[in-house]
Image (tube, rainbow, N blue to C red):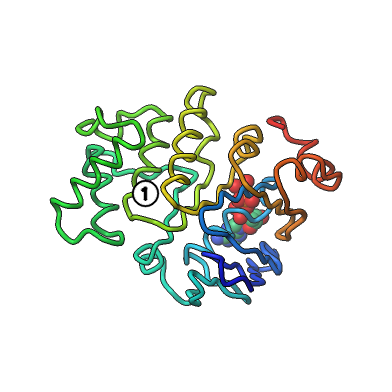
């Protein structure tokens, strides 16, 4: 184990009935790293996020955050100590405006104990993701691109040290996708470590420091984006068959 890691996924396995969704998955996340997580549909990527975020307990293995075993921590406790996530299907409070949506994340996250300081932080974060002029707009009126940015803002409001991004670029126009990529780069610059699941190869390869390929619940390959793009097993199992590749 590497003491320098901010997160350690330690030989995690998870089964749903007869289906082995994850098998002996083991990797570390370095401070300030962007780790791209790719793999075919059903490979186990979201299940892995659910295990890291505490939604699912692994059948075996453990999750260490800042060298502390958090495997038994509930999702809300993991969020409070600095593990945040976005959802593939965005889940804002539709009838609330943006600043209230993000204030909820700030209030229940790590640092803000008063509504007014949570609100101030929410305004700063909305500005950070380029939505500082939309504070009073209700979430239900947002475009898909802005919904994804709101999802990012809500996760950021919890002041994470590890951020799990579940397909924040998929489904966006190229311009919207580029905007989100720029936001992800800024989040990294602010010192956050990121794991991102993404099917849009150009985006994930462009922004990741390192990548992991999951296939049938197991790590098929790990390396730089260039190594992954050139790995014959990866091409065979995944890249060759994906329309975005
Ligand atoms: N709660 C659950 N109960 C039963 N089976 C599940 C559950 N969650 C996921 N699975 C199954 O586990 C496998 C891995 O699913 P998972 O959603 O983790 O894949 P994924 O790599 O995220 O796929 P995608 O790219 O399509 O989102 C799939 O076969 C899925 O049907």
Q: Is residue 57 above or below residue 155?
A: below
Secondary structure type for disc 1: helix
> Which quadrant of the figure has residue 58?
bottom right
The image shows residue 124, relative to residue 73, as above or below, that is: above
- Considering only vertical position in the picture, is 1 above or below 160? below
| Quadrant, the C terminus | top right
Q: Nearer the viewer, residue 41 or 223?
A: 223
Q: Is mark 1 within 8 Å of ligand 1?
A: no
Looking at the rendering, in which quadrant would you find the N terminus?
bottom right
Q: At x 67% / y 62%, what residue is drawn?
A: 21
Q: Describe residue 66's horizontal placement relative to residue 61 as left or right.
A: left
Q: Determine which quarter of the picture holds residue 133.
A: top left
Q: Is residue 34 above or below residue 48?
A: above
Query: Relative to the observer, which residue lies in front, 193 or 204?
Result: 193
Q: Position of residue 185 (x, y in %)?
A: 49, 39
Q: Is residue 29 left or right of residue 160?
A: right
x and y, in percent, of residue 87 in the image:
46, 48
Mark 1, residue position: 156
**Ligand 1 in which quarter:** bottom right
Residue shown at the point (30%, 59%) measured from the top left: 109
Q: Which residue occupies the foreground of this view, 198 or 56? A: 198
Task: State the image coordinates of residue 18 (x, y, percent, origin top left).
Answer: 70, 67
The reply, left or right, for residue 23 in relation to residue 9 is: right
Q: Residue drawn 51% across and 34% down?
A: 181
Residue drawn at point x = 43 percent, y = 74 percent: 73
Q: Residues within 10 Å of mark 1 (few under 14, many from 20)?
A: many
Report the label total: 1
């Amino acid at each position: 184990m590497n003491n320098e890691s901010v997160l350690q996924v330690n030989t995690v396995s998870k089964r749903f009935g007869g289906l082995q969704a994850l098998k002996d998955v083991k990797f570390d996340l370095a401070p300030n790293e962007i780790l791209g997580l790719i793999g075919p549909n059903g490979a186990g990527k979201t299940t892995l996020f659910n295990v890291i975020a505490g939604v699912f307990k692994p059948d075996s293995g453990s999750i260490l955050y800042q060298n502390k075993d958090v495997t038994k921590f509930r999702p809300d406790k993991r969020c409070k100590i600095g593990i945040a996530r976005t959802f593939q299907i965005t889940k804002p409070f539709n009838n609330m405006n943006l600043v209230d949506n993000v204030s909820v994340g700030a209030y229940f996250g790590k640092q803000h104990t008063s509504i007014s300081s949570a609100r101030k932080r929410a305004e700063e974060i909305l500005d950070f993701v380029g939505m500082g002029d939309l504070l009073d707009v209700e979430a239900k009126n947002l475009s898909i691109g802005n919904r994804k940015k709101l999802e990012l803002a809500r996760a950021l409001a919890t002041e994470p040290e590890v951020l799990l991004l579940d397909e924040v670029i998929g489904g966006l126009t190229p311009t919207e996708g580029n905007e989100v990529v720029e936001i992800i780069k800024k989040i990294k610059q602010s010192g956050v470590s990121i794991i991102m699941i993404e099917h849009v190869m150009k985006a994930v390869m462009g922004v990741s420091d390192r990548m992991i390929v999951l296939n049938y619940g197991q790590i098929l390959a790990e390396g730089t984006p260039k190594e992954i793009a050139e790995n014959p097993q990866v091409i065979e199992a995944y890249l060759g068959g994906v329309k975005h590749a």
